[in-house]
Amino acid sequence: MHLRRTALAAVAALAVTFGLSGGASAAGGTDTGSPGDIVSAAPTSFHPLPGQPTNTRAWHVTYRSTTARGTPNVVSGTVIVPQDGRTGPRPLITYAVGTVGIADQCAPSAGFPRGTTLEANLIQLLTARGWAVAVTDYEGLGTPGDHTYTVGRAEGHAVLDAARAALRLPQAGLGPDTPVGIMGYSQGGQAGSWAAELHDSYAPELDVRGTATGGVPADLLKTADFNNGGVGAGLVLMAAVGQNAAFPELRLDSYLNDKGRAYVDFLKSHCVVIDAAAGLFKRIGDVTVRNPLYEADWQRVLRASTLGTHAPDHPVYLYHGVIDELIPYEVGRKLRADWCAKGATVRWKSLPLAEHVTGVIAESIPAANWLAERFAGRPVEGNC
């Protein structure tokens, strides 16, 4: 009972932190324009808690981006700007949230006006510094099509294009010379780290000063194996749904038994706390007729989301809890080693007493402080 209570607490807190992410083909009109171009923009509001004032202005936007296959799509998100009287340039954080679920009602932009997007409490710490924040909903979450949860390349595109969209939104008062930081934890750590790796090839015009990511699921195969039958078991099937959304030739349905098909339908109708609680301690064998993770095509697409194959072209602050119960600590250490071996400037921080949720809570302010130093142009010291 104690383990189950601990697991349920971790699942609930995971919604306050972050998880993993991705998406499928979105709205029409994807055949013209460039990544980051705004398709639509409308005023919205940003509330960490129901009705809580934040002295900010916010806009719900849809913007052009790119799928994992390199085809155009449209993604939704939110741009938030402090109303602090500042008239000069201000930094912009493109912020990657963690696992919220794969149903459209779980999108961060859907919860901001109601005060139900729990990561908003962490975002508010950034707007309180006078920073603008762009928050992607990721591909297929809040737009037509299924959410490509955990598809790294699609996530990285969506994060970078959210920054582009914020800079191109006239009402936001930003401009092309705006310094940009990338931030995320868990799924958001995956998305933010992919954005860091893709920056030099996909969005080199963005003045990215630094990336701060933690609890990164840099290797999905190892993370899935770690969570099979454990606290994060529900996230494994969510990830399978997300990969199948991006790559339908994987034919996830052909691997599922009746229980698995019913569970997928459940996942597509609820958000992360309920989804993950329903999946506690399930094993892949409980919901499949055979394990797709043993198949070559599944292994290929999951390995395509592996991080560490390309060095970010800017400094990175990377951190991980030693006793993380959702994302193996060794996966984080391996990402640090891979980036360091490729010449990246990495400031690594091991958190000896931190599990998954403690990690993001403990490091939210230090990570932002590190980004503030990058915005101020202070020298960077890695510890590879």
Image (spheres, rainbow, N blue to C red):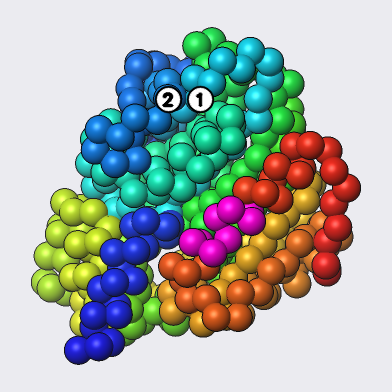
Q: Residue at x 21, y 76 (%)?
A: 287
Asked whether residue 123 is in view, the answer is yes
Asked whether residue 23 is in view, the answer is no
Q: In the image, is residue 130 above or below residue 306?
A: above
Look at the numbered discs 1 and 2 and tell me whether their residues touch, using CB distance below 8 Å. Answer: yes
Please report the bounds of the magenta region as a residue range.
360-367
Disc 1 marks a residue whose amino acid type is: Pro
Disc 2 marks a residue whose amino acid type is: Asn
- At mark 1, the secondary structure is strand
For residue 293, which quarter of the picture?
bottom left
For residue 364, which quarter of the picture?
bottom right
Q: Is residue 286 left or right of residue 327?
A: left
**The stretch drawn in magenta includes residue 364:** yes
Q: Residue at x 34, y 71 (%)?
A: 10
Depth order, front residue of 43/66: 43
Q: Which mark is residue 82?
A: 1
Q: Is residue 239 left or right of residue 283?
A: right
Which secondary structure type mostly characterizes the magenta part of the structure? Answer: helix
For residue 49, which quarter of the picture?
top left
Depth order, front residue of 110/265: 110
Q: Residue at x 83, y 69 (%)?
A: 384
Q: Position of residue 302 (x, y in %)?
A: 50, 65
In this figure, which residue is indicated by the disc labeled 2? 55
